[in-house]
Image: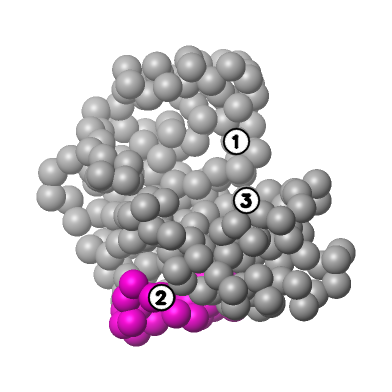
Amino acid sequence: MLPPALDKDQVHVWTIHLEAGKAGTMHDTSILSAEEVCRANRIPIPEVRQHFIIARASLRRILAFYTGSDAATLDFEYGQAGKPSLAGNTGLNFNLSYSRNIAKVAVAMHRAVGIDIQAIDQATDPESVARLVFSPEEISNLLSLPADGRPMAFTQTWVRKEAYIKALGAGFSRLTHSFSVSTAPGDIDALRNDESDHLATAEWRLMQIKAPAGYCAALAAAGRDWHYIEIESDLLPEL
């Protein structure tokens, strides 16, 4: 069974499990570029290095499926804030995020996308970090919750903010406290306001998406006329 074709009103979201034996990781390395291999070799922790390799190789295989290209020959370009795109005018937009052993890739046609997934870290002090990076509205919403509910709410808020920033392609030149997102669980229209763009809520859609237990994930894309489809990586044909 193959994944569905990518229509213009769809965003495909692939879920990838970043666990493989040594042989699988070596095979994945063979389709990476020299620059990607150098980046991998600079990662000192073997498990984290393996996750990077599998995530990047999976991204290549996914993009090769949509473009009909050889995964090993895909050429990436990078924007000013480091967001990658495919060289040439393919019209295909994508974004990758991974945390611990889970990755997600968002793919769309002629539509900017951003995705983020994070493991929920119970050891993080949500209040202290939120005061540095959240808007006043988000901080207030977080502090209104019982202490044991804050790690989940903090992570839900953070992945939404990061997905939106990644969709914009602005990186962290965009101040994270200059826009607000909902902290409500399961929100499928989570962008509340953006001081830098008063039309943002009409021109973008930001939503919480499915994530494994212990994780939170969010997806942002340009326009209001799209829906997303979850795809498991085992549907990816061998290339």
Q: Which mark is residue 118?
A: 3
Image check: 139 left or right of 88?
Answer: right
Residue drawn 49% across and 57% down? 162
Look at the image and give the residue range highlighted in magenta. Answer: 185-209
- Label 1 sits on residue: 18
Marks 3/1: CA–CA distance: 14 Å
Q: Is residue 55 visible?
A: yes
Q: Amino acid at mark 1?
A: Leu
Marks 2/1: CA–CA distance: 34 Å
Q: Is residue 226 visible?
A: no
Image check: 186 left or right of 124?
Answer: left
Residue drawn 77% across and 78% down? 144
Q: Which mark is residue 194?
A: 2
Quarter residue 65 falls in: top left
Quadrant of the image containing the C terminus: top left
Per the image, label 1 sits on a secondary structure element best described as loop
Which of 38 and 105 lies nearest the eye of the viewer? Answer: 38
Q: Earlier in the sequence, mark 3 or mark 2?
A: 3
Q: Does the magenta portion include 210? A: no
Q: In the rendered image of this protein, does residue 96 appear above or below residue 216?
A: above
Residue drawn 47% across and 21% down? 40
Q: Earlier in the sequence, mark 2 or mark 1?
A: 1
Quarter residue 68 falls in: top left
Image check: 19 left or right of 10?
Answer: right
Residue 123 rendering spot, x and y as whole percentages: 80, 46
Viewer-side label of 3, 1: 3
Marks 3/2: CA–CA distance: 23 Å
Q: Does the magenta portion include 208? A: yes
Q: Amino acid at mark 3?
A: Gln
Q: In the rendered image of this protein, does residue 22 appear above or below residue 7?
A: above
